[in-house]
Amino acid sequence: MEKLAQVKLREAGQTLFFSYQEEEKASVVTTTEPVKTGIKIGGYCIVEADRGNDYGHIVSCGLNIADKTQEEPIRKIIRPANAFDLKQIDENKIKAKEASGSCQNKIREHKLNMKLIDCEYSFDRGKIIFYFTAESRIDFRELVKDLAKIFKARIELRQIGVRDEARLSGGCGACGRQLCCASFLKDFEPVMIKMAKEQGLPLNPPKISGLCGRL
């Protein structure tokens, strides 16, 4: 039986629905009992991507197709991540740190007014994504050319906002716990001062704002 799982791509990617087959077998009393497929919450899996394969960790699973809410076509989970996949994921994280250093050097070389926040490889290492913040539009075409020559891979530079910067950087909020955006929030819903008033919180923006400076 085809089921849906929500998968957060890589470490900083989107959370999307992917389909997988949950096989069933008939029991003695004519009921059905799901056969374990290795798809479980918190586990890593390999999924279909735009070009090649990618990885992510499973946020939820066992959902019915009728529960689908995203408009994009649903791609498939290829397999649960095995020991070799997990080793490659760890190696990709190490390579991403090295790539960040090279990118930072090139940013200084081109004198670009941008702040590099994070970097990550796709599972098959065919694409590298660099996340950055900037106060204005940046012409990074020459930077992309240089990075493509160095890494021999497709390069994507993705400009993000202050909320995404806090999510990628992580940290603790005023409550002393891990940032909500870095732990469980999937989308950034609008937050109004009115909500703080209804909860009896002090109407002092610096006290109720997150590390990103936003409500």
Image: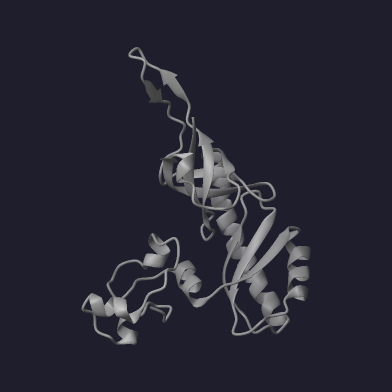
Taking 136 as reference, is 208 left or right? left
Q: Position of residue 15 (x, y in %)?
A: 50, 55
Residue 157 place in picture, x, y as percent: 66, 69
Residue 167 x %, y %: 46, 68
Residue at far left of view? 200
Number of marks in the rendered image:
0
- The color scheme shown is one colour
* Residue 188 in the figure: left or right of residue 193: right
Work out whether residue 33 can be spotted: yes
Front-lying residue, 57 or 189: 189
* Along the line of sight, the residue nearer the viewer: 212 or 21: 21
In the rendered image, which quarter is residue 148 located in?
bottom right
> Which residue is depicted at the point 59% across and 74% down?
132
Q: Nearer the viewer, residue 70 or 27?
A: 70
Q: Is residue 48 above or below residue 188?
A: above
Q: Residue at x 25, y 80 (%)?
A: 197
Q: Which residue ends up furthest to the top in the rendered image?
A: 28
Q: Quadrant of residue 128 in the image?
A: bottom right
Residue ID at (37%, 68%): 179
Q: Note whether residue 81 is visible.
A: no
Residue 37 percent location from the top left of the image: 47, 31
Residue 117 occupies quadrant: bottom right
Who is closer to the viewer here, 66 or 214?
A: 66
